[in-house]
Amino acid sequence: MSQPFRLAVEILGARGSTPSPGPGTLRYGGNTTCVSIRSQNGDRVIIDAGSGIRKLGRTLQAENPRPADINLFLTHFHWDHIQGLPFFSPLIQGGARVCFHAGVSPRETRARLERQMSDPFFTLDFNAAKAQCEFMQVSSAVVRCGAIAVQAFPLNHPQGAWGYRIEAGGAAVVVATDVEHGHPMLDTMLRERATGADLMIYDAQYTDAEYASRAGWGHSTASAASCVAKDAGVKQLMLSHHDPEHDDETMDRIVAQTKTLFPATVAAQEGATIFI
Ligand SMILES: [Zn+2]
Ligand SMILES: [Zn+2]
C-alpha cells in the first residue's frame, strides 16, 4: 500500500569519483551519483546521470515502455555524474522526451554529452540515441516540472557545479554535490538555498583527516556538512558522494561521528527511498 508523501527521494547511486562495487560496499552501494525525486502525483526529476541511472532507466521502461517526459538535471559534467547516460535505456531506445538541464548553454551541454558518446569512446553516437532530446540552461529562476519546482544555485567546485533545491507540496530537498566549503560567497548562498529544507543531500567525501591533504580537490567533509545543516536549519542531513575507499564499516563510523555533531544525520544508501 502506498503511503502519503510529498516527495519520494530514491537513491540510485551515492558513490563519488568512480564506481566501487564489491563485498565491502554492499550496503551503501558502489554506483556513482543519481537521485530520483518524485511527487505524489507521479511527476519526477532526476539529479545526475552517474552509473546509478542505468537501473532507473530499466525501472522507468518497465513501468511504461514510453516513459513520460524525463527531466534530468546535471550538477556538472565530471565523469561520475554523466557516465551512466550511455546505458540509460529511455535515452538510447527512444519513446521518451529527455530534457537535459545544466549550468552551461544548451549548445555546450549537447557538445559535452556528444563528446562522451563518440568514437572511439563508445559504440553509439549521442546523436544516434532515439529519444527526443532537449537542452535547457539553469539559472536562479525556478524551473517547473509539473508539481515539482527546481531552483539551481552555483557551488564551489573545480570547473563549476550547480546545486538544486527541489520543492513540491511544501516539502523541500536540497542536493549539494559536488561542493567544497571555504568560498565565503558561495557558502552563504548554499546556506540560504538550504534554509529549512526537509532533507539536504551533501558532498561529504572526506573525513577531516583526509581533507587535510585534499583541500582544493572540490569536496567537503561530514563535519563541514553538519555545520551547513545546523546553520541552515535543515531537518535531516544525508551524507553523500562517498569516497571509493570508504567501505561500509568506514561509512558507519562516519555517520556515528557526525550524529554527535548533528543528530539527524544519515548516509545515502543505494536502493533506499526516503519519503517526505
Ligand atoms: Zn563527483
Ligand atoms: Zn565533480
Image (cartoon, helix red, strand yellow):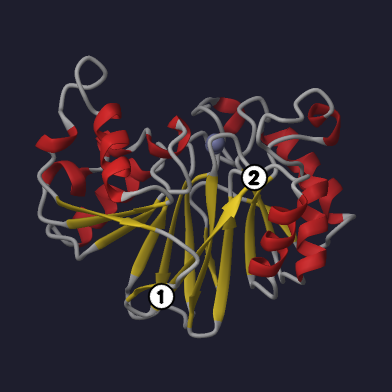
For this rendering, which residue is in front, 76 or 270? 76
Q: Which three-letter amino acid code belongs to the residue tagged 1?
A: Ile
For this rendering, which residue is in front, 184 or 40? 184
Residue 29 marker: none
For this rendering, which residue is in front, 38 or 202? 202
Residue 75 image position (x, y, % from top left): 48, 48
Q: Residues within 10 Å of mark 2 (few under 14, many from 20)?
A: many
Residue 61 image position (x, y, % from top left): 20, 54
The image quadrant where one finds the C terminus is bottom right
Identity of the residue drawn at 32% across and 34% down: 112
Q: Secondary structure at mark 2?
A: loop
- Residue 226 seen in the figure: yes
Q: Earlier in the sequence, mark 1 or mark 2?
A: 1
Q: Residues within 10 Å of mark 1 (few under 14, many from 20)?
A: many
Residue at the right extreme of this rendering: 260
For this rendering, which residue is in front, 58 or 198? 198
Q: Is residue 227 above or below residue 192?
A: above
Q: Which three-letter amino acid code belongs to the residue tagged 2?
A: Asn
- Describe residue 117's horizontal placement relative to residue 176 as left or right: left
Rendering quadrant holding ligand 2: top right
Q: Secondary structure at mark 1?
A: strand
Q: Which residue is mark 1?
A: 148
Q: Which residue is mark 2?
A: 156
Residue at the top extreme of this rendering: 120
Residue 45 image position (x, y, % from top left): 38, 63
Residue 240 image position (x, y, % from top left): 62, 46
